[in-house]
Image (spheres, helix red, strand yellow):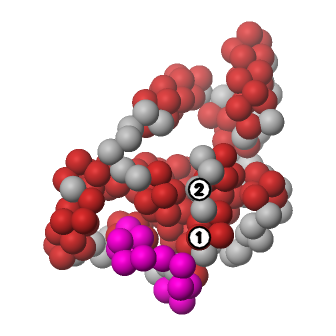
Amino acid sequence: MPSTFRIPKAELTGLYGAVVRRVSRKMYGEVPDVGYVYFHHKPVLRAVMGFESKVGKWDALDPTYKSLAQLAAASTIGCSWCLDFGYYLARNEKLDIAKISQVQVWRTADVFDETERRVIEYAEAMSSTPPTVTDEMVADLIDELGTEATVELTQMIALENMRSRFNSAAGLQSQGYSDVCEIPLAPASVGSEA
């Protein structure tokens, strides 16, 4: 389903628009729909791109845990664009796509170990409204991952909440990124929030 663009799709004009188109096509094959929305406010676009480039350098958390958490958060919030793009990124990072594709049905899937299940449960708890995080959840994650990785995990989930809520509110829908992963995109809500 194409994006509805509740915030109108901006025309990528001028030198900055040419740069956005060129970089996006080089990185993703096309301009992500979110780029058209952010282009309305270039300082926001630059700030988000700058922050995202810094986030990409964080490495205290295992990439699989990071991907599972982001996809669980996106699923809980109901952002099909974020799920679509998240599967694409996981594939490009050479993560186990058979496992990643089961995030939306993690409670019944038999592919996750206990730590992965805790990561997904924590992401859902942080992404619910209101959040349902418990002291025990955090303590278990610190015991298993360490404090630094737990801080990174928590921030990645919070960041995915920002992304998913923005994209969902802007009317962005799956753009077809997951098609290259051969993952059928399920409805985007398995958590407590529709």
Quarter of the figure with residue 131 = bottom left
Magenta stretch bounds: 107-119
Instruction: Check disc 2 and give the amino acid type.
Output: Leu
Quadrant, the C terminus:
bottom right
Instruction: Residue at 76%, 58% (x, y): give it.
Output: 181
Quarter containing the N terminus:
bottom right
Residue found at the far bottom of this picture: 108
Is residue 141 one of those drawn in magenta? Answer: no
The spot of residue 15 in percent (x, y) is: 74, 10
Label number found at residue 99: 1
Instruction: Tell me the quarter of the picture where residue 32 sits.
Output: top right
Gap between marks 2 and 1, in whole Å? 8 Å
Q: Secondary structure at mark 1?
A: helix
Q: Residue at x 35, y 54 (%)?
A: 153
Q: Are marks 2 and 1 in contact (CB under 8 Å)?
A: yes
In the image, is residue 122 above or below residue 192? above
State left or right for residue 105 relative to residue 18: left
Say which residue label 2 marks. Answer: 95
- Dot 2: element: loop
Magenta stretch holds residue 113: yes
Residue 39 is situated, as x and y percent measured from the top left of the image, at 66, 29
